[in-house]
Amino acid sequence: MTKIGVYVCHCGLNIAGTVDVENVTEYAKGLPDVTVARHYTYMCSEPGQRMIQDDIKSHKLDRIVIATCSPRMHEETFRRAVAETGLNPYLVEIVNLREHVSWAHTHEPEKATEKAKDLVRMGVARARLLEPLEKRKVKVEKSVLVVGGGIAGMQASLDLANAGFKVYLVEKSPSIGGRMAQLDKTFPTLDCSACILTPKMVDVAKHRNITLLTNAEVTDVKGFVGNYEVSILKKPRYVDAKKCVGCELCTKACPVKIPDKFNENLTEKRAIYIYSAHAVPKIAVIDPDGCLRLKTKKGNVCGKCQEVCEAKAIAFEQEPETIRVKVGGVVVAVGSEVFDASRMAELGYGRFKNVISNIEFERISDASGPTGGKIRSLYSGKVPKSIVFVQCVGSRDKRFHAYCCRVGCMVTLKQAILAREKILEDVRIYVCYIDLRAFGKGYDEFYSRARDMDIDFVAGIPSEIHCSPNGSLYFDVYDKGTNKLLEMHADMVVLGTGLVPNADLERISSLFHASRSADGFLLEAHPKLRPLESAVAGIFLAGACQGPKDIPDTVAQASGAAAKAIDLLSSGEIELEPLKAVVDKDLCSGCKICESICPFIAIEMKTEPGKDKEKSRAEVIEAMCQGCGLCSSACPTGAIKIQQFSNPQVLTQVQAALAEAKPKGGK
Amino acid sequence: MSLTDLMTMATPNLESREKILARLCGRDLVNCFQCIKCTSGCTALKLLELRPHEIVKLVNLGFVDELASSDIIWTCATCLKCVQRCPQKASPYHVIVALRNLAVEREAKVPEGYLKAVSQILETGLAEPCRKIVTRKMETVDRECLGLPKVCNPKESFQAVFMKAMEEKP
């Protein structure tokens, strides 16, 4: 004889404000097999949980129905509470009275109460047929793949490696360092980016627990949490990494010039090059699209680099290589890109040479950049007498990206301060802005420092930028503060371009099954409570691939993601949910429909030893199955069921739903 | 009333504001965060002192009456730069057109040029009359010497339909 306890939660006023919880509780008392029914303000609180536990002991309850918020929120909480009493945690049924009832029908309290009763009746019916299930434990690999070698990936790698985990750090470019390596100074303290980054880059390269794979990309991911099998494509450098000493003799000998991506294509480099002045690893690499010999595929062409290399490190014969590694978890830290301002035609970027983006300004201001750190026009070579910064280019703009880029205001303040410090009194500096957002620790103080340095702020955005024949720029801008239309002349306009999702993100998201939010960035499992993980178990997110971020936030998230990975893998084994598909082998006809539709490749067709070899049967790889139920609904013979969602368990709910339903209208 | 313009003692007229919003089919076209890009580039600002961002803000706050009876709404040159460049996809132009309609409905003073245009259309079916032009060779030509067909006056039924459309209030 089943004994069911029904518990109705008020959720403060979230549920009780709309649903008559007392009425629902009274109704539940009258349902068959219900021994106790109670309601309480916060069922998830300690006294609420204790109430359920006490009842299980005193009334010997064996099924629990909790009418509360979404199971996504507190199913685990209640399962744990029930398990503490010795009852199997899978004998708990959650009825969602918040998302499905009170929040959806705020203006119809009476109908909402009726619906709540219906749902409770269905829940009780289903609870009767629940079966006890056991969690399974699987061993996990104590190693982690980190994708992306920017500051986020480096921080996560160092934290994981220091905790004793084996780390595979995969970076697409020939050097780690990412966006941060391109920056001159960092806000709000103005410490030099290279000074704080380069030692970290060296730490990463030297750490005995980190395997650094630069010039490489992840091409395939198989497996499941704790046991991922990852294929990494290592693109050829055409230089023997063991022999190259980074002397740069070859880069002087090479006759081919190609645009320098590290300098935002403002300068040129040779087809054999070292990625940047402080590249790690400092090994030359040949661009196969630039190199004459690799392009023509003829063994006797050019070869100047080979002639000068004393270490005999040039290796034209190198082939791409695929490396397979087993890891327990993945930290995705692929970062973001900078908005392409040429898409915003009215501002003249790409048409006028002195309109530059903020990342280009960063390279100009950097000591290792095209001007050696002197702020001047790259085309006339002149020091600008007036610089105007225009904010929110491509962000907070529904035509391009609706979100705030979160770094643009601070980047502009920093660059304005740098311009003032480097050119001293001889430059007028203006910032055209919509709202100035200086929200972080020490950020508003930084804003005030900029105002002290004779940097002028104009509350208004120009509609279009014009260029006079001598290359100087001019435009009108209406200032909110003075209510005047101002004409501004500038030798240099710096556009506050925002951060946008990486072009690679689509491939990355399908590779790891990590979904993306509407803004195009990777989606976290919960915006407030699980910001470090994707919805897929074992895939963690760090840095600007999850949303635009400045360096402090990126580092914080990277350390957090590393801690989450350590939390998951440190015990060496993880528990798997038992809500999986199971196959009744006697019913299975071997039609392979389930195998073809399973999105998680969790079904294998196997022939049984000693039986008809032609006939194979479906088998579920439990660790891969996510319990989505596609196979169960597709199986023509009904051989596959999902634990806890078998046909009788679902159909009894349907019957309960229709049992007391009143016919509506008509005959 | 929770809001008073202390310069004119005007208070918001939320009813007229609703009317404007209904003409704009929702709030999207007044969803403005005051970046002032529209005013920075407004064709009618320098000579005629039209400040589109102010008009949008005034409509948002409900100060519609003052606008509907003002001359300023008739200065818009309808160049549509503000529509194209607005980062919030708001449209000062559409707000201005809605205000003009409201002004006509209230029988406010409409600038002569607009009234002329209406009678012009009524008579000829054209917003601009056919004119003689002077070419680069300083010859004065009209449609006839260019071999273009004559423009006919519209049928009477057109006038009836046009008048009816004018009288219909949305």
Image (spheres, rainbow, N blue to C red):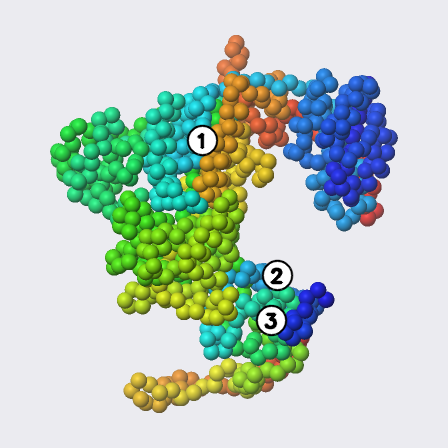
The residue at which mark 3 appears reads as B98
**Direction from residue A462 to residue B160 in the image, left or right:** right
Q: Give the residue at x 79% y 33%.
A: A40
Helix, strand or loop at disc 3?
helix
- In the rendered structure, which amino acid carries the disc numbered 2? Arg
Q: Residues within 10 Å of mark 2 (few under 14, many from 20)?
A: some
The residue singled out by tag 1 in the image is A156
x, y percentage for residue B83? 50, 65
Q: Is mark 1 on a helix, strand or loop?
A: helix
Q: Is residue A615 visible?
A: no
Judging depth in this view, the residue of A443 and A93 nearest the camera is: A443
User: Circle 2 sits on which residue?
Assistant: B27
Instruction: Tell me if residue B44 comes above or below residue A291 in the rendering.
Output: below
Q: Are marks 1 and 3 on the same chain?
A: no
| Residue A337 in the image, given as x and y percentages of width and height | 41, 45
Q: How crowded is mark 3: few (under 14 residues within 10 Å), some or many (20 or more)?
A: some
Answer few, some or many: residues within 10 Å of disc 1's Cα (few below 14, many 20 plus, some between 14 and 19): many
